[in-house]
Image: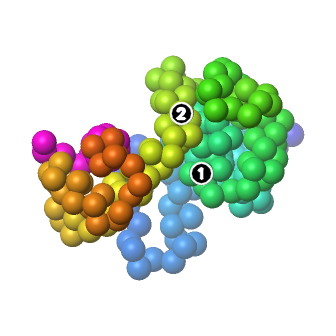
Amino acid sequence: MARVVPLRDALNVDKSRSVGRVKPEESNFVKYTQIFRQLLLLNEKNDLATTLKNIQELLNFSENIFSSPAVAETFLYFCLHGAGTAWVLQTELNQPEATVYRTLKRLRAVGLISPALKVSKVQSSKGGPRPTVWALSSASGDEIAAALRHHYRTLSPKYRVAEEVAQTIMDQYVKKGREEITYRDLLEQIKEMRIPFKAPDIADLAAQYLVEKGVKVWR
């Protein structure tokens, strides 16, 4: 039977020493090596054989998820937000409906997501099954609630237009170093874009979107 070498002895690591930061000019292989060193140091209480097994499982998991760009993108969305609906994934990731449902089915099959709740239909619904909020097992109640709110908001034509206005504002002002705008800025942008909705309605929604993105809106 092979002798299990304690990770501390195998690496001859001083516990007070940490892995140095990767310099921007270093190659990807150097960066990947640093990542593995961090994994080893985080698990230094395990023996080397156990750590190796864990890393192999991680690599197998990564291959299963990241072999498909659509599945990988959807998985990362759930990692960032915790929960979401098929409709939100379509709009946020710009994926076809069939692709979204295929990726959700795959993520559910491997046990990464599960249905958290059913979404009530809006009055303009044309029928069909009720949408589902899908969530990671580690998703919080707040993340699930936020996913539900986001679903309803993205169904609204006004919200989608307001999001476009807000994004235009961010491109024109925020990316140039301006972190605050006025409500008048929003109204002027809406007028310039010739939006076929009442300006105050769109301005209110756009202001809410900007605040959520960390932009101060003065009224």
Disc 1 from disc 2: Cα separation: 12 Å
Whether residue 59 appears in this view of the structure is: no
Magenta-colored span: 203-219
Give the residue number, with chain letter if any, for mark 2: 152
Magenta segment includes 205: yes
Which quadrant would residue 172 be assigned to in this image? bottom left
Residues at badges 1 and 2 in contact (C-beta under 8 Å)?
Answer: no
The number of callouts visible is: 2
- Please state which of residues 44 and 120 is positioned toward the viewer in this rendering: 120
Tag 1: residue type?
Answer: Thr
Residue 163 position, x and y percent, is 41, 51
The residue tagged with tag 1: helix, strand or loop? helix
Give the residue number, with chain letter if any, for mark 1: 91
Up the image or down, 72 lies above or below 3; here it is below
Is residue 78 found left or right of 70 in the rendered image?
A: left
- Mark closest to the chain's N terminus, 1 or 2: 1
Tag 2: residue type?
Answer: Tyr
- Please state which of residues 72 and 180 is positioned toward the viewer in this rendering: 180
Q: For the N terminus, give its image quadrant.
A: top right
- Please state which of residues 146 and 25 is positioned toward the viewer in this rendering: 146
The residue tagged with tag 2: helix, strand or loop? helix
Up the image or down, 137 lies above or below 82; here it is above
Q: Residue at x 53, y 57 (%)?
A: 35
Question: Crowding at label 1, few (<14), some or many (≥20) Cα neighbours within 10 Å?
Answer: some
Q: Residue at x 61, y 27 (%)?
A: 122
Which quadrant would residue 178 be assigned to in this image? bottom left
Up the image or down, 45 lies above or below 14; here it is above
Q: Residue at x 23, y 49 (%)?
A: 215
Is residue 96 found left or right of 165 in the rendered image?
A: right
Residue 25 position, x and y percent, is 41, 79
